[in-house]
Image (spheres, rainbow, N blue to C red):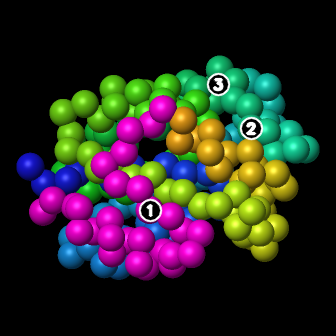
Amino acid sequence: MATQVIVLNGGSSSGKSGISRCLQAVLPDPWLALSVDTMVEAMPASLRSSDAGITFGPDGQVDVGPAFQAMDAAWTEGIAAMARAGARVIVDDVFLGGAVSQQRWQKSLAGLEVLWVGVRCDSAVAAGREIARGDRVEGMAALQAEVVHEGVAYDLVVDTTHTESLACARTIATRVRR
């Protein structure tokens, strides 16, 4: 069966978004690229700084509440529905709950052909990218660099510490079933 979904999991500023764009360029078929950042941006502003939604601590800690969790559950089911309807989808996510986050995705994507990809990056390198981006709370990259991978099973792991997004995308593309 052809790969229907590619799930990229990694900490903030690890390079997932760049890899997603490069995958869209190197894969022969069209793929949608959807990011947890897109979902957060689509949420009402009132939930982007609320205990019910999502909060970003001054040290980079990210906490999510029940309204965020409900929207996230709908988001994952929606992505699965798009894949079941024939769209090929690249998911860019941050598994704050490690293995529990992957299990949530596995439940939603049950019956679909999924390529699970870990996107690693040295925490110091990711922290430098975080500062250069200027749109993240300082400390998120360092806090998330390892915790998002705890207990998560992958088909493939790429490391962007010294490897560019395009090279990582080409490596991933070799594992995509057509």
Q: Amino acid at mark 1?
A: Val
Please tell me whether residue 173 belongs to the stretch shown in magenta. yes
Displayed quadrant of residue 146: top right
**Within-10-Å neighbours for mark 1: few <14, some 14–19, many 20+:** some
**Range shown magenta:** 151-178
Q: CA distance from mark 3 to mark 2?
A: 15 Å
Q: Which mark is residue 67?
A: 3
Horizontally, residue 171 falls left or right of residue 2, namely right
Displayed quadrant of residue 113: top left
**1 or 2: mark nearer the eye:** 1
Q: In the structure shown, which secondary structural element does the residue marked by tag 2 occupy?
A: strand
Q: Which mark is residue 158?
A: 1
Q: Quadrant of the C terminus?
A: bottom left
Q: Amino acid at mark 3?
A: Ala
Sequence-wise, the earlier of marks 1 and 2 is 2
Which residue is painted at 41% across and 78% down in the image?
Answer: 167
Sequence-wise, the earlier of marks 1 and 3 is 3
Along the viewing direction, whichever of 86 and 172 lies nearer the viewer: 172
Q: Amino acid at mark 2?
A: Val
